[in-house]
Image (cartoon, grey):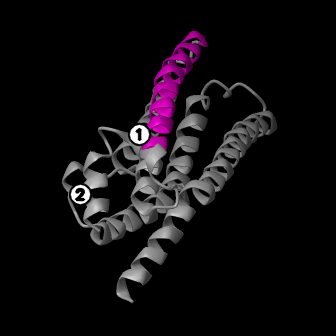
Amino acid sequence: MDNMIELWQQARLDETRMDNLYRKEDLVPMIVSLEKRQQNLLRFKTLSVLILLPAIMILFLNMGIVTPVSFLGMGIFITSVLVVVIMLNRLRFRIKDGERTLSTLRLAGIAEKKIQTEKKLFTTYLPLFLVVALIGFNLMFFDYLMEEEPATRILYHLVMTGGLAVAFIVGLSVRIRRFQKQFLPVQERITKFKSKSKS
């Protein structure tokens, strides 16, 4: 047990050597590896959003949509996206410095709770913010389509809503597969470790 605690304390300083020296099925290396992968992935996602949002704003403004309703929609859309990015960064799977000195058993319990939080992100929070983003996105073009026939306007809004919904579903399915591939093995290893600790 002491060796595992020492390994955890040194993990941030020498992750590469740790990965080479210890078996992949050991609990602490699995947690460190998962944390490292999630950190790199989130950095990429955050950078992508910071690039895409200004591009969307420029495109929106170039279309000459300058009504209060359209600006309200843009504000709702951008705010919802930024809130998601902030939430992902704050709630992502991350072990705090103060938690790295805990016993492996307590660390396992903390990691288990963080995995459940990760699951709640894409089962509860993200679908909720999708609805808000869809409302904002449709408001952005509400006045722009005002001169179109009612049937045409409805069609455009349905197409935009459907396109965003499909993109979200595809992204959600990718996230679910990644959760099953990366998080569930750690969850199963934690369950086995806690079971052995009680016996």
Q: Tell me the amino acid under the disc marked 2.
A: Glu
Within 10 angstroms of label 1, few (less than 14), some, or many (20 or more) residues? Answer: few
Residue drawn 79% across the image and 38% down it: 155
Magenta span dominant secondary structure:
helix
Residue 48 colored in magenta in the image: yes
Depth order, front residue of 105/143: 105
Residue drawn 73% across the image and 43% down it: 162
Circle 2 residue: 99
Residue drawn 43% across the image and 53% down it: 29
Depth order, front residue of 163/104: 104
- Above or below, 169 relative to 117: above
Q: Secondary structure at mark 2?
A: helix
Number of dots carrying numbers: 2
> Does residue 69 show up?
no
**In the image, farthest residue toward the bottom:** 199
Task: Tell me: 159 left or right of 192.
Answer: right
| Range covered by the magenta-colored residues | 36-63
Task: Tell me: 132 left or right of 158.
Answer: left
Q: Tell me the amino acid under the disc marked 1.
A: Arg
Residue 61 colored in magenta in the image: yes
Split into 4 quadrants, where in the image is the N terminus? bottom left
Circle 1 residue: 17
Task: Tell me: 70 left or right of 87.
Answer: right
Q: Secondary structure at mark 1?
A: helix
**In the image, farthest residue toward the top:** 62
Depth order, front residue of 29/170: 29
The location of residue 9, given as percent across then percent down, is: 25, 50
